[in-house]
Image (cartoon, rainbow, N blue to C red):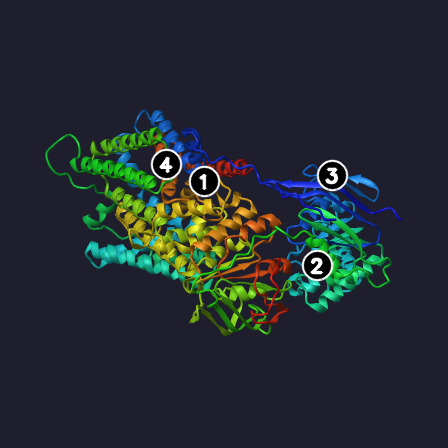
Amino acid sequence: MTTTTTPPKDAPEAPSAPRSAGALLIDMMRANMRQYGMLVALAFIVILFQIWTDGTLLLPSNVSNLIQQNGYILILAIGMMIVIIAGHIDLSVGSLVAFVGAMSAVMMVKHDMPWVLALVLSLLIGAVAGAWQGFFIAYVGIPSFIVTLAGMLLFRGLTQIVLEGQSLSPFPDGFQNIAKGFIPEMGPYTQYHNPTLVIGAVTVAFLLFREGRHRKRQLAYDLDVTPTGLWVAKCVAMTAAVVAFTLTLASFHGVPVVLLIMCGLLIGLGYVMRNAVIGRHVYALGGNKAAAKLSGVKDKRVTFLIFVNMGVLAALAGCVYAARLNAGTPQAGLNFELEAIAASFIGGASMSGGVGTVLGAVIGGLVLGVLNNGMSLVNIGTDYQQVIKGLVLLAAVGFDVWNKRKAGR
Amino acid sequence: MTRPVLEMRGITKTFPGVRALSDVHLTVRPGEIHAVCGENGAGKSTLMKVLSGVHEHGSYEGEIHFEGESVAFKDIRASERHGIVIIHQELALVPYLSIAENIFLGNERATRGRIDWNGTLREANRLLKRVGLDEKPQTPVADLGVGKQQLVEIAKALSKEVKLLILDEPTAALNDEDSAKLLDLILELREQGIAAIVISHKLGEIRQIADAVTILRDGQSIETLTVRERPDVEPRLSEDRIIRGMVGRDLDHRFPERTRYDGEDAGTLALAVTGWTVRHPVDHQRKVVDDVSLTVRRGEIVGVSGLMGAGRTELAMSVFGRSYGQYVAGSVAVGGREVTTKTVPAAIDAGIAYVTEDRKQYGLNLIDTIHRNISLASLPGMRRGGVPGLVDEHHERSVAERYRASMNIKAPTVFEQVGRLSGGNQQKVVLSKWIHADPEVLILDEPTRGMTSRRAASTSGPSSRSTPSSTGSPRRARRCCSSPPNCRNCSGCATGSTPWPRAG
């Protein structure tokens, strides 16, 4: 009975030989299917409405308007994405937007506070609100759904108490500029907005520099790199996109202040999520909390900080929204949490956490924003707009689920 | 000889990358208690899943005959209709539903969609009497202990007119008293003509109740032995004989060659745990680990062995950042210096690494890539330009590439999702993670669970540093450890210098 068992054969593995550019491209696309898919969908929606509105959609004035219209939702979506990656949810952001807007109105309109100080204090209020919720979620262990549902009621109520049911206005010009302003024109008359051109040029230079450095370091570490042709194509496409966007903005009033804020957040938080230890810990927590804890991730602290961050961003969005309306109103921010959550899911977040990117949230937010703007331009009523947005959300996530199931086989 | 109630012939089942079962035969006679034995990963659970229809007909080769006719189950309900009911190791009860509701879950007594509560309660009462459980059928299952829950599972099986009952490690989570009760019940059911297949690691129990035992090894049925001729006689078969079947004779080459660690610090103290005592996280009366001491010297591999529930994992996890239970007393010293291991980061800083028993639940982020899993425990060390808090992605990636080559992780790139790798490769990722954290002491908790022996050999290769390795398999403990302390049920433990013959 001395049976020598035949060892089980290993599964045939993919060959590790260098693969063709096409295969690499497909691999890359597959890895970020939802994000690439959404980028394609965004482009499709833009083209669709560009044709449908006879070119109104991409008119410089409308592009500026589009950015200013959606700035606060995009800011919220960035924070919401991080919350969802960590496996949580925040339902309170809409109410927090209203509350912070109200507080800023009280400070500036009632007490004549300088707007910069009021802005800083408003952000601080957001941080404290976030810390309040983060404390209960991280250290007490109440599910975020419950804590932020309570926050939704609580902050809405506080808003009404603070404003006594009234709207407060007007805000100082400086404050209004956060939402409505552009960076000032400088230099000689050139038909274009000069500082915008400079910013565009710097952006292109920076992007190309970054791509080049990234590639050099990959080579230095002896890692697989994207084939040269593909890489050049990527750089050209990127440059073209930035140049087109810059010229569009520069032929109107230039770069809106909101866009500057948003880009700062996108670059800063995107960098943190990708390259900072704490960002990695957020992904690990959302992917497998138990494993993350056993790998030395300080789960409570990370969770707490995520909600503080969300609070600050909600406060920022609250200021932007109040500045845009030029009033603190009790009804501000209604359903903003739902828009932000929808943007995150359209942009690649997963209900169970662990996946998604900040850029994805922005893309998701833009899909919703362009839909809103485009549909308004062609006079589709808000009733149908809601129906269509609902279907888009369902389709985006449905496509992702279907795609994953196919890949899993 | 009577006609067998169940015959499984030539069952072969392959998963991507692994042949879990090959040409397995199993024959159960009417009214027989038939034990199935084998090491972890031998294929016992897979065989039972084939039998109960979890793996549908067509996904495996071979045939199953039940009560003389050929059967092909497409799901678990189909096998239940024939009277084959499986009770899994993890109980499948809904905690907040009552006993009666659980018994008839999925099988409700109802007329035209309306539940017949009187009938349900009456029938539940009858079944509870039959399994000897003195509880009201309205009691929520959450209020019962594990032993009683196990009885509810059996009552549930009985409600389905069971003819062949499959029990997967039924006593694993039970204390001695509850185990004895359960075993008595299985014997009683046999008298009522219900055959049973029992999967168990506890060989004593098998000798106590089984009539025959089939031994699986590496996915093959090795042999079927008769435990006793008649139910009322003492068993003939010895535990040693069963172990011999499970292990096989040709032990050579199934483990890597032992090499001696010859560094300058060889033999100096690496880890010393003294008087370690931990209470159960919920039941504070119970000491899960009671005054355990052990020492590991540099270059030594120390095995910690014990049965399920002996406290191996609990010991390891509580030492590693107090991740389990409520700390009572004890100290840990690494390299002769007392260290604090209050939190996981502190334990890692002190030079302790812990490879969990359940890699999917506690070891890996399955939806993330290989390189990010490997770096997770040592991110602060991968500084970008010396800035604390930032991660150098390129460095991270090249580290992962290095481990992919040296550990022979079979994946096209380090960007592959860990969830798509086979179990053995996943384990290599976990090991890479902890080796890269550069610990003084590596604690491995059942590192070869769910892997075939050959894979186990290749994963246990690189761990030549000081390594306490907790394992349920005494054979493996013997093969790779210099000295195995033993954990016995819920308490106590010998110190780590029991002389142990070099395995050869």
Distance Cα–Cα, label 1 vs label 2: 42 Å
Residue drawn at 42 percent across, 29 percent down: A20
Chain label for disc 4: A
Question: Label 1 sits on what residue type?
Answer: Thr
Residue closest to the eye, A172 or A129: A129
Q: For numbered disc 3, what is the local secondary structure?
A: strand
Chain label for disc 1: B
Q: Is mark 1 in CB contact (under 8 Å) with mark 2?
A: no
Question: Label 3 sits on what residue type?
Answer: Gly
Distance Cα–Cα, label 1 vs label 3: 37 Å
Q: For numbered disc 1, what is the local secondary structure?
A: loop
Where does label 4 land, which residue? A225
Q: Is residue B292 left or right of residue A51?
A: right
Q: For numbered disc 2, what is the local secondary structure?
A: loop
Where's residue A305, x and y in %?
37, 57
Distance Cα–Cα, label 4 vs label 1: 12 Å
Bin the neighbour count of mark 1 within 10 Å (Cα to Cα): few under 14, some 14-19, many 20 and up: some
Question: Label 4 sits on what residue type?
Answer: Val
